[in-house]
Amino acid sequence: MIAGIDIGGTTSKIGLVQEGRVLRQVRISTTGHADDHAFADALAQAVRQLCIQEGSPAIEAVGIGAPNANQFTGIIEMAPNLPWKHDVPLARMMQDRLGAPAVLGNDANAAALGEWRYGAGQGFDDLLVVTIGTGVGSGFIVNGQLVLGSAGNAGELGHMTIVVDGRLCTCGRKGCLETYVSIRGMRQTYAELADDLDVLKEEGVKCIADAAHRGDQAALRTFEETVRWLAIGLANAVAVTGPRRVVLFGGIVRSGELLLAPLKRAFQVALLNIYQGRVDITVSALADDDAALLGAAALATTLTRT
Amino acid sequence: MIAGIDIGGTTSKIGLVQEGRVLRQVRISTTGHADDHAFADALAQAVRQLCIQEGSPAIEAVGIGAPNANQFTGIIEMAPNLPWKHDVPLARMMQDRLGAPAVLGNDANAAALGEWRYGAGQGFDDLLVVTIGTGVGSGFIVNGQLVLGSAGNAGELGHMTIVVDGRLCTCGRKGCLETYVSIRGMRQTYAELADDLDVLKEEGVKCIADAAHRGDQAALRTFEETVRWLAIGLANAVAVTGPRRVVLFGGIVRSGELLLAPLKRAFQVALLNIYQGRVDITVSALADDDAALLGAAALATTLTRT
């Protein structure tokens, strides 16, 4: 039995995971705690309550996915989207509170491990998992190992420069892939293409997808442009690490004919010839609600493998 | 004692390598042989002669670096710059002729292994080696392993799209990094910027460097633009695999103040914040004449490590 914890900017999820299934889960607010210690107390309390509800005496390990997490040190480093601007050694803090070994990892890397161990990436020792949401996260499996890099949080495809001097990114640089293909990026693309911005009154990109289905030209163009950037970004990643499969996760990629079908075609064209026909794109096999927890739990499985 | 073989488009080098030193070497023409079997015969004959000259009874292993080489299959796959357009199973062909195990690998990956085992990359388990010549080659070390990818020849930074719909590349795609930062790319940049193309009467980029030293504005701008593209390309690679060191190889990078010094500054600016100050750039520590052979020999050392 593993406790999986997924730290988000507003909400954090806590779950009990066994053999690739989420048995039970609960959410708590990430904000509004006195400090990071109080937050860690609340997380530990949630784990204990889930154990009681499940009738489970104890957990073997804790896996924690979080933004800006350094897997080598177990520290969340100055995460811009979390309430604490200082370094938070959350792995040690949870280990102390729960008496079980804890692994903290980058949330996108956790998602990649989750797909690899339990989802659409099973059996692929060279794999790329890309999560498209507010931003673009990614995790790379190479030679059957998660790519951590020297700083413990490598695999930032979303911050690959795709347009020199392009759109300003939240990271402070310009032209990052995520400024074009994320929810934020797609909304900006639509805003640049449309005469009438009424479509954007709702949040997210469902409003753009709905408009595209109605034949709105700016919305259709928005999907075309997104496909184009994403195909190039994925092909660039393939040129570097040579995965055999790309798994996509996130609401946007479930837009079917608007995104996935044209993306698969554009991706094959964008690939370097030696990879054409040798890499496929598929959509996550994990339930949206479980994926982050399974990924966090998968981090804990690295304890016994490295 | 390892036989290292480096297959080039016009010339191939054969050498005997022991403990990271090239003891003896010879060159033969890659072209002009009746077929690939006759070429393999000539390579084997060269190895045997070197052994006789060295007074060495036998070799332990053969390492072969070649363009378009698949390290998993030992096959050179349809290399556009070699005389044989079909698949050439050179690892097996050399093994049969020399009676020693042979490893064939991508020449850029061989260079990376050479720097890692014997050069400026020693001790770095997360490393990127970039060779800038007619094109741009690269090899990635991640978690202490060469990144081969599912097709056995990953690590093609030169074919990362850096400008969407940019310059036409020899690979048939557009905007690849190597169309901007290679010898060919720099000459094209100069041609686009200069009113007077007399500078380009000589081959290579030394003529551009000489012009820059004379204060030629187009030549100075050519180096500035090259630095800008290369810094972004390297930063993109760092975002994916997170190396702690980048080793550059090739005549261009020895242009000192014109390229390396401004590149080091531009690279730090181009890096995602979590990597700033954590990754350095350095120039190859291997002699130009030995590097390819040491790299090929380093491929053979993977025999005992995997």
Image (spheres, coloured by chain):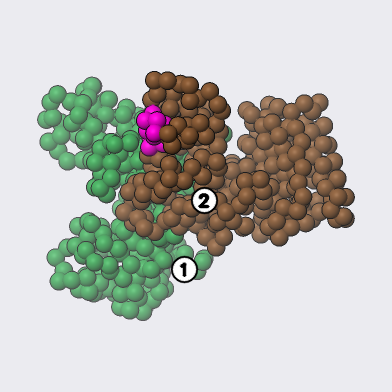
Chain colours: A green, B brown
* Type of the residue with mark 1: Leu
Q: Residue at x 62, y 58 (%)?
A: B117
Q: Nearer the viewer, residue A25 or A120?
A: A120
Q: Which residue is mark 2?
A: B283
Q: Please, which chain is the residue tagged with disc 2 on?
A: B
Q: Nearer the viewer, mark 2 or mark 1?
A: 2
Segment tinted magenta in the rendering: B215-225
Asked if the stretch drawn in magenta spans residue B224, the answer is yes
The tag on residue A303 is 1
Residue A240: give x, y in percent of width and height. 49, 43
Residue A180: give x, y in percent of width and height. 29, 37
Q: Nearer the viewer, residue B229 or A89?
A: B229
Q: Residue at x 85, y 55 (%)?
A: B56
User: Where, quadrant-wise, is the N terminus of chain B in this rendering?
Assistant: bottom right
Looking at the rendered structure, the secondary structure element under dot 2 is: strand
Looking at the image, is B18 positioned above or below residue B231?
below
Asked if the stretch drawn in magenta spans residue B193, the answer is no
Q: Residue at x 39, y 64 (%)?
A: A71
Looking at the rendered structure, the secondary structure element under dot 1 is: helix
